[in-house]
Amino acid sequence: MPTLKGHLLIATPHLQSPIFTRSVILMLEQNEEGALGVILNQPINATMSDLAGKIFVEGFEWDKPISLGGPVPSSLIVLHAIELLADQEIIPGVYMTADGSKVQELVARRPEPSLVVANCSGWGPGQLDGEIRDGSWLTLPATIYHVFGTEETELWRVVVHEVSRKNLADLLGVRDVPADPSLN
């Protein structure tokens, strides 16, 4: 299977894990060793200011909400649009940073758009491919709008609608399907 880096995983009702219910995951990496991503639509009741003086030495004020990226403990991950402070580019215009010194620089800059996630989602070799074959996940190429431009509470609904339109277009063999085909 080709890499899913830069794609979204969209949880289907077949997925039994409560942490992934109606989740949308941005895939950061996939190779023969496994896969890594972060949930985009699971805000938690914490902000970056809550971490000042705890995991960051200096105090600061930034009311940026923190999201839960998944069940796997990891360093803080920031998705942002500043190429200079990137560990890697995920899709054009969306960069990922987990390096501590770069994250501190990002905190000092308070970039927008950005998304801060604690933890990540991970799969062992072949595990994700099996879950996709079993119908637990749908996939869709990610856009900057998916990452930064959609309300977290609406993201799952928005991308399920996009996948439905894409699948309908593929089934019918047409290139463009209107947002509401019933209006035709």
Image (spheres, rainbow, N blue to C red):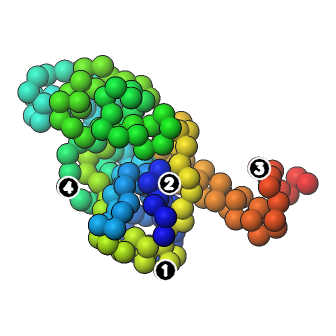
- Kindly indicate whether the residue at mark 3 contacts the one at mark 4 (C-beta within 8 angstroms): no
Q: Say whether residue 91 is left or right of residue 47.
A: right
Q: Secondary structure at mark 2?
A: strand
> At label 4, which amino acid type do we have?
Pro
- The residue pinned by badge 3 equals 179
Which one is earlier in the sequence, the residue at label 1 or at label 4? 4
Residue 61, percent across and down?
Answer: 23, 21
Q: Is residue 78 visible?
A: no
| Nearest to viewer (mark 2 / mark 3) | 2
Which one is earlier in the sequence, the residue at label 3 or at label 1? 1
- How far apart are the alpha carbons under marks 1 and 4? 26 Å
Picture disc at residue 7: 2
Which one is earlier in the sequence, the residue at label 4 or at label 3? 4
Q: Say whether residue 69 is left or right of residue 55.
A: right
Residue 176, percent across and down?
Answer: 80, 52
The quadrant in which residue 161 appears is bottom right
- The residue pinned by badge 1 equals 134
Picture disc at residue 79: none
- Label 2 neighbourhood size at 10 Å, few (<14), some (14-19), many (20+)? many
The quadrant in which residue 72 appears is bottom left
Residue 41, percent across and down?
Answer: 43, 49
